[in-house]
Amino acid sequence: MRLAFLLLAAAALVGCRDKSVVADALHSVLVTLPDGHEIHAQPMVDTADLLRGMQFRKSLDADHGMLYFQRQPGKYGYWMYQTLIPLDMIWIDADNKIVEIVENTPPCKTAASQCPLYGGHEMAKYVLQLRGGMAQKYGLKVGQQVQF
């Protein structure tokens, strides 16, 4: 049944003119926020994805983001080197509980060595990045659960 749904969805998307919409729809994780709002998050799993992240992207829709999957729980700081838009970063532990939030991190327009690190003060397994201001809009708070 699930395979049939995926094939039907893929067939429906073939007619889309914007190929990035097709790729995004087929390669995303649905993250359900505590208020029930759904975010289509691009999974970042391998080392190259984790290092590149949101670099060079000029925009991010309100209901889209990136979800970084770390191999094991740890304290992971993130930077904004070559990131062009402000982001909200939400650290999530292995039980899908929000453990840290840093809102509206500004793009870093200096040398990489001068870019500050954000977050990474709590043990986390995942980091969800959203367009700046979305954490406040969705009422995200430390201690809340997300689902994916």
Image (tube, rainbow, N blue to C red):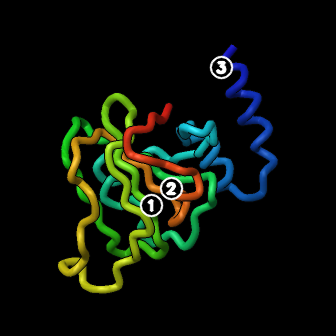
Picture coordinates of residue 44 (x, y %)? Answer: 40, 47
Quick one: which residue is furthest to the top in this view? 1
Three-letter code for the amino acid on which mark 1 is drawn: Asp
Give SS at disc 3: helix
Asked where in the image residue 12 lies, by quadrant, the reply is top right
Gap between marks 2 and 3 measured at Cα: 33 Å
Q: Is residue 105 above or below residue 46?
A: below
Labels 2 and 3: the sequence-earlier one: 3
Q: Residue at x 40, y 51 (%)?
A: 90
Image quadrant occupied by the N terminus: top right
Which one is nearer the viewer's eye here, 26 or 63? 63
Q: Nearer the viewer, mark 2 or mark 1?
A: 2
Residue contact at pointers 2 and 1, CB within 8 angstroms: yes
- The mark found on residue 135 in the picture is 2
> Which residue has dot 1 on it?
88
Picture coordinates of residue 95 (x, y %)? Answer: 35, 28
Q: Residues within 10 Å of mark 2 (few under 14, many from 20)?
A: many
> Which residue has dot 3 on it?
3
Q: Residue at x 55, y 42 (%)?
A: 28
Q: Residue at x 44, y 38 (%)?
A: 144
Three-letter code for the amino acid on which mark 3 is drawn: Leu
Q: Residue at x 76, y 28 (%)?
A: 8
Picture coordinates of residue 13 (x, y %)? Answer: 75, 43
Give SS at disc 2: helix
